[in-house]
Image: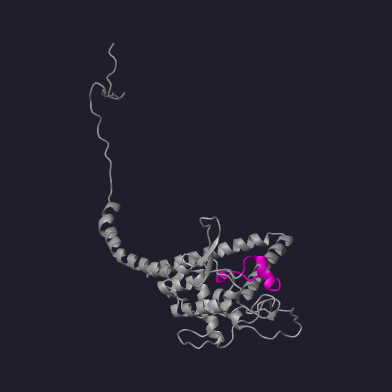
Amino acid sequence: MARVLSRLYSGGASYSGSRRAHSFAFGRFAELSAYKKMLYGTLGAAAVAGGCLLYALETSEVEASGIDLHAPHFHWPHSGVIDAFDHNSLRRGYQVYKQVCAACHSLKYIAYRNLVGVTHTEEEAKAEAAAIQVQDGPDENGKMFMRPGKLADYFPKPYPNDAAARAANNGALPPDLSYITLARHGNEHYIFSLLTGYTEAPAGIELRDGQAYNPYFPGGALSMAQQLYDEGVEYEDGTKATVSQMAKDVSEFLSWAAMPEHDSRKRMVIKAVLYFALIYPVVYYAYKFKWSLLKSRKSQYVLLPRPRNRFNPPTSTPSSSAPPSH
């Protein structure tokens, strides 16, 4: 009974304390002038409205213009915490890039050696590299020469410079695709939606010559026409090359191009978790049964008397000293 009464008393005391705190806060607010009350109320309302607006813009699939769409969220084979890329899809995506995208877009930060063990064997990657011609030199005569590509060579650029690229694409510069999935909001979801989102322009939208309408592209007017069509690529493994299949494969390939270390990084996480799972019991045992003795030990220091010698004579106190004799 006493325990129940003590709990009720402590609960009532905390409740009364919170009541006092609230009354103090409201009392301080009531003491403010009408101008400050209005100012604080306006700031609070603006903060709430701004938060609601940001949440609505982030979750909405339609931009403020009313014609631009956010890319929906898809489940990819590598989306999980310990999931890896689908390497069959990466090989097909490389084929789509090589036969469709490489005509205009470069992949200048990826070398043929990066394909080894991911999409191709070493011999296959060497054959892919040998199919291109790379300028090298100078030779013994001081002249540049062309040679077959090697594994150390990077993917070739479709144009010698940006001016030539703009001249061939009605003034538009095709972006490099090495980090395109990381450079765009939505990552691979955006790439897939863009490649499969071509449609007729709605009423009121005027397109210039050479432009196509895509609601997933900001503004809608895209200088790149639709590039993927059914059976546009003949896959080596016999997979049916639909538009969505090709878009999925090349999107995953570009995701790998932006993060070649993706799979090895996740393998390292798995190894680290297993390592800590094995070492944790040992550390816990050492802490509880070894270190706890030292941690809970109490050290007490005792002041020892000073040794008496000619360098450290005994000191006499006034109480113990004898009175002077007369």
Residue 260 visible at all: no
Q: Is residue 292 left or right of residue 54?
A: left
x%, y% of residue 299? Answer: 28, 46
- Residue 253 or 309: which is nearer the viewer? 253
Q: Is residue 164 visible?
A: yes
Residue 287 in percent (x, y) is at: 29, 58
Q: Residue at x 53, y 79 (%)?
A: 96
Q: Is residue 295 above or below residue 107?
A: above
- Looking at the rendered image, the quarter that the C terminus falls into is top left
Nearest the viewer among 185 and 171 is: 171
Q: Examine the structure image and report whether residue 226 is included in the region drawn in magenta.
A: no
Which quadrant does the N terminus fall into?
bottom left
Magenta span: helix, strand or loop, mainly? loop
x, y percentage for residue 10? 45, 65
In magenta, the rendered stretch is 159-181
162 in magenta = yes
Q: Which percent across, then down, holds residue 87?
A: 44, 77
